[in-house]
Amino acid sequence: MPVDPFEVFHILFQTYGPQHWWPGETPFEIIVGAVLTQNTAWNNVSRAIANLKEAHLLALDALHAAEADTVLPLISPSGFYHVKYRRLKALLGYLNCPGAWEYLQTAPVEEARAQLLAIHGIGPETADSILLYAFDRPTFVVDAYTRRLFARLGEDWMEKAPYEAVRRYFMERLPLDIPLYNEFHALIVVHGKVHCRKRPNCQGCPLAHDCAAQRASALCV
DNA sequence: ACCCAGGGTCATA
DNA sequence: TATGACCATGGG
C-alpha cells in the first residue's frame, strides 16, 4: 500500500502546526536566502542575511550596485561565497530587467519557472523556492529532506530520482493549493531536522505507523 | 578529526 | 545517463 502524501501532510500539520514560511520578511530577502541556502545550513545563511541587512544591502538596487569587495565578506558565513556571489549577480541582473517581476508574478507558472531555470546557478529547487515563497506561485519544492522522508516511507526510488520526477509525483497527488504547498515543504524540513541523517529514530515520531507499515527498519531502529 | 547541511555546475566515461 | 569533484563555512 503506497504512501499518501496528503495523509503525510495532515500528520505533520497536526504534529508541528503551521510554520508560516519562508523565514524572511520581504520577497527580496526570500530570494536572496534561496540562493544562499544552497547546500548550506540555515544558521549560516541567517548570519549572511543579517550582515546584508545591517549594511542596508537587502534591496534589489542596492545589492545589484554593490561592489564584490563589500558583498563577499558579508555573505561569506553562508559558504561557497564566490560561487553564490556570481549566482546572486546573475539573478539580480534578471530581476532588474523591466517586466521581470511582473512576469514572474503573472506568467503561467511553468514559463516563469523556465525563466528562472535559464539563469546560471538557479536550479530547480532554488527556482521553486523563489516562485512559491517569494511570489506565492503554485509549484512544489523538492529538497533532500523530501526525498529522504518519502524514501523512508516506502518510496525507495525517490532518493536518486530526477528532480522533475519527484516534483511531478507530489503535484499529481496533491490538490493545487498554494498554502498547502507552502506548509507542506516547511513541515518536511522541520520534521527532517528532527529526524536527521544521524538520528532517524522514531521515538515519538508521528509517522512511525506509516513507517512501520512500509519500512520498519529504515526509520524505526 | 571527522561528517553534515533546505544545490548546482562541470568534467569525465 | 550517471557518477565524482568542486565550491567553503559553522555546528555536532
Image (cartoon, coloured by chain):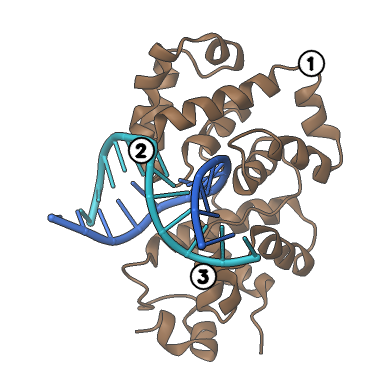
Chain colours: A brown, B blue, C cyan
Q: Quadrant of residue A25?
A: top right
Find residue A118 and report its horizontal and vertical position in percent. Answer: 71, 36
Q: Which mark is residue A130?
A: none
| Disc 1/disc 3 C-alpha distance (Å) | 41 Å
Q: Quadrant of residue A198?
A: bottom left
Q: Which mark is residue A98?
A: 1
Position above or below: A150 against B7: below
| Disc 1/disc 2 C-alpha distance (Å) | 32 Å
Which element carries disc 3, helix, strand or loop? helix
Q: Is residue A123 left or right of residue A212?
A: right
Mark with earlier residue (2, 3): 2
Q: Chain of mark 2?
A: A
Q: Is residue A202 left or right of residue A25?
A: left
Dot 2: within a 10 Å radius of its alpha carbon, few (fewer than 14), some, or many (20 or more) residues? some
Quadrant of image for the C terminus of chain A: bottom left
Closer to the camera in the image, C1 or A188: C1
Q: The disc labelled 2 sits on which kind of residue?
A: Asn
